[in-house]
Image (cartoon, grey):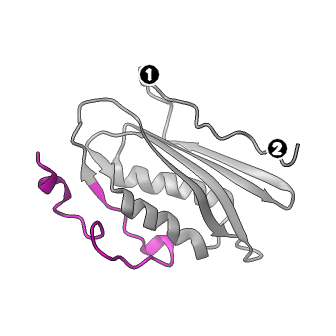
Amino acid sequence: MTDDDIYSGLQQLGQPTRVPTDPSEAVLERVQNPEAGQRYVVRFTAPEFTSLCPMTGQPDFAHLVIDYVPRDWLVESKSLKLFLFSFRNHGAFHEACTVSIGRRLVDLLDPEWLRIGGYWYPRGGMPIDVFWASGPAPAGIWLPDQGVPGYRGRG
């Protein structure tokens, strides 16, 4: 399998792409896993994720960490960035944002396993952390801690 074969069907990589204004119109793309058959973990970290509170319209900020064990497919990173960026003007609660991102990736990739940690900055004085996984972590893989400390404020 050559790089040309892997990337031949992509529509966003390597060219100017309009930023989607809503997650439902964002196009997530995938590429064949060149290491299919090997078990390994892929991690994406989005430390500046933003969305809107659906009630007040005020911005919400989170640090997202996505880990997955691929089978046949990898998410194409530019499409993932644009997908995450599409939440910028989208009103949804923390839980809905975090879980919907995880579910959309599972639907696209059919990974062996996926988890997402949404470490949300305080709203109304209280941080909210949301965690979702497609199932139990597979045995026999190295799965590092997501490395995001609990919110401590100024303490």
Q: Earlier in the sequence, mark 2 or mark 1?
A: 1
Q: Which residues are magenta?
A: 1-30
Q: Position of residue 5 (x, y in %)?
A: 12, 54
Q: Residue 53 vs residue 70: left or right?
A: right
Q: What is the three-letter code of the residue carrying label 1?
A: Ala
Question: How many tags in the picture?
Answer: 2
Is 4 a magenta residue?
yes
Q: Residue 37 vs residue 121: left or right?
A: left
Task: Decide: is 24 above or below 74.
Answer: below
Location of the N terminus (image quadrant): top left
Q: Residue 122 vs residue 13: left or right?
A: right
Q: Position of residue 58 (x, y in %)?
A: 74, 74
Q: Residue at x 50, y 79 (%)?
A: 21
Is 58 a magenta residue?
no
Q: For mark 1, does the 10 Å Cα neighbourhood hold few (<14), some (14 to 19), or many (20 or more) residues?
A: few
Q: Depth check: give the residue in front, 144 or 93.
A: 144
Q: Residue at x 42, y 53 (%)?
A: 105
Q: Depth check: give the residue in front, 129 or 17.
A: 17
Task: Decide: is 138 above or below 48.
Answer: above
Q: Main secondary structure of the magenta part?
A: loop
Give the secondary structure at mark 1.
loop
Reading the image, the residue beneath label 2 is 152
